[in-house]
Image (tube, rainbow, N blue to C red):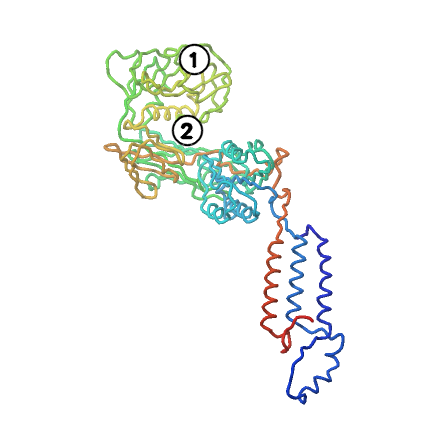
Amino acid sequence: MDVLNPLAFWFALLAIPIVLLYLLRLQRREQLVSSTLLWRRAALDREANALWQRLQRNLLLFLQLATLAFLIFALARPYINAPDAASQQIVVLLDTSASMQATDVRPSRFEAARAQVSALIEALGAGDRMTLIAVDEAPRALVTLTNDKPQLRDTLRALRPTLGAANWSAAIALAKAIGSGDRETTTFVVSDGAGAADLTLLPGPVRFIPVGESSDNLAITTLALRRTRDGLAALVRLTNHGLRDEEALVVVEAEAALIDARTLAVAAGKSTEWTVSDIPPDARWVRARIDKARYNLLAADDAAYAVNGSNITRRALLITRGNLFLEQALAALPNLRVARATTPPTNAERYDLYVLDNMSATLPAGANALLIGAQGVFTPVAIFSDTAYARVAPHPIARDLDWRTVSVRDAYRLAAPDWLQPVVEGQGGPLVLAGESPDGALGRLVVLSFDLRRSDLPLQIAFPILIANSVAWLAPPGGLDIPLSVRPGAVVALPAGTRVTLPSGETATLGTQGFAQTEQPGVYAFEAGQVRGAFAVNFFNVAESRIAPNPDLALSRPNLLPAAEARAAQREFWHALAALALALLVAEWWVYQRGLPALGRRSSARRPA
C-alpha cells in the first residue's frame, strides 16, 4: 500500500491539542445543595482544582483520535496496486476451445483460466467497463461494456469449454469492433496460446495470461471401416502429440461388444496404425478408445466412432477402359453395387452415382458424378507439373484426408465453373475440386484434375479415404445427405419430424429441418419416415489435440506483454476511510449524549473543557 498525498499526515499534529484539552483542569458546574457536610472531602481535592491533571482512559478521547486518524488517512489518498485498472475499458478473450480441457493444470486449464478472469473482475474499479468474449469456433461477446460484477461473475460461472477450435481471427475482429473509438482499451487474452499467432493483430496494449504446462497427449485421429470377404475391417490410427515415447492400450468394440484390444507403441510426434479384422458385417457401429496410457492429458480425443452406413444399396456406374485400383476401391465400399462399362450407356437407366475414369460422357440432368481426368467434360486450359502439396480445404470429402505424401506428375488446369471449389490444391493449381450445380443441369461433382496412373495416389492410404468420402457425399444412403461422421457442433441436414436418439439415450424430435444438438461425441440414431440410419460425432481435430502450450506467445510483438509485466494500476480506497471517520464521529456524539462511562472507570464520560 502507498499514498498519493503524504503531506496530509501533518494533520496528525491536531492530536496534540485534543489530548491537551483532556489534561486541563475540569470546569465544574455550580450546584445548590442543602448542606456541605458530605462535600468537604471533595473541596479538599487539590488535583481536581489544579491546572493540569493526570490523563485518564476515556472513550470519547479514543473515538476522537480514531476519527482524526481515519480523516488523515483519507486525505493522504492511500491506494493498492491492482491488475491494469488504469484502463477504463477492458476486453477479455477467454479461450474455450477443446485444448483448454487438458488436465496438466488441476483441475483443468479452463478452470485455471476462469480463476484468472475472476480475479480481473474483482479488480474492476468504479469507472471500469469489461467485455467478456468466449473464443471457440464461433466467438461471441457474452457480456458487453459493463461494470456489473454480479452479472460478470454469473456469466463466467455458467461458461463451459467446447470441443471446437479457437477462431482467433473472428475473435480479434469482434474485439476490435467493441474497442473501436476508445484509446484506453486494454485486451486480456487468457489461453494456452495454441494456434493464437494472430494475436499480433490486436491493437493497443495486450496482456497475455498463459495457462498450461505440458504437451503430453495421445489421440485417436482416424477410425475407418471397410468391407472385406470375412466381414468388416477397421483402420485405427493412434497419434502421439507429446515429446516422449508412449504405449497405450487401445480397445475396439462393435456395439459395445469387445472385438479386440492391443497395446500400441507410438514414438513422440508420430502415429501408428492398427487394422482390426473379423468385425461382424451387420454391426451398426464401431468404437475405438484408449483404455490406458501414462501420459494422456486430454480425454476428448480418446475415443472415435464409425458407423457402418445404411442397409439401402446404392447403384454406381463405372465407365473406364480398365483401372484395377479404382475398381477395388469402389468394390470395398459397403452397400454400393457397381456396374462397369467401357462406353457411356445409351439406355435411360438411372444410377445414383457415375464414375468417369478419363472418359467423355453426357450425364443425365442432376446426375452426381466422380470425374477422374475430366478432360472429356471440362476443357483443359493448360497442364502444370508444380503439384507439390499446398493445402486441403475443409470439405466432407477431405475428412481424415492426409495429402502431404501424395505425388502427382502433372495435372490439367480446367475451365471449370465457379461453383466447383478447390478442395486439394498443389502449388500450381487445384488437384481435387468439388461442388454442386446451382441450376440443376448437373448434381454434385467431385473432379480429380489428373490421371490416377500419373500419380502414386492409388498406393497411398489417402486413396481409399478420398473415394469413400466422395461416394458418401455424392450418393448418400437412402437419398438423405447425411454424412457418416461429423464434427461436434455441426448441423446435420435431417428433415423435420425426424426422431433422433442421442448417445446419452435421450430422444429428440425435430420441429424444423436440421439437427444441431451434436455437442456430445458418439453415435446418433435417427428415424426419418421409412429411412433409418445413424451418424457419428467425432472429435478429429489435430490442432486441438496438439495441446502444447505457448507461454512465450506474448513476446512476438512489442504490444504483447506478459500479465506479470503489465503496469500495475492504483486502486484508491479513501472513500471507505472517510465513511469510517463519519461513523466514528456519529458514535462519539452518541456516547457523549448517553454519558457512557470512560474506559476502565465508573465516572461519567465527558468531553474536554
Which residue position is annotated with label 1? 414
Mark earlier in primary sequence (2, 1): 2
Residue in the foreground of this view, choosing between 41 and 82:
41
Q: Count of labels shown?
A: 2
* Looking at the image, residue 92 lies above or below residue 477: below
Which residue position is annotated with label 2? 399
Q: Is residue 547 left or right of residue 58?
A: left
Q: Position of residue 433 (x, y in %)?
A: 41, 19
What is the quadrant of residue 532 in the picture? top left
**Quadrant where the C terminus lies?**
bottom right
Q: Is residue 185 left or right of residue 396?
A: right
Residue shown at the point (60%, 45%) measured from the top left: 85
* Looking at the image, residue 222 lies above or below residue 290: above
Q: Position of residue 163 (x, y in %)?
A: 44, 38
- The kind of residue on which mark 2 rests is Arg
Residue shown at the point (60%, 60%) measured from the top left: 582
Residue in the foreground of this view, choosing between 476 and 453:
476
Disc 1 element: strand
Disc 2 element: loop
Q: Position of residue 292 (x, y in %)?
A: 45, 44
| Disc 1 packing (10 Å; few <14; some 14–19; many ≥20) | many
| Disc 2 packing (10 Å; few <14; some 14–19; many ≥20) | many
* Looking at the image, residue 302 lies above or below residue 351: below
Outermost residue to the bottom: 37
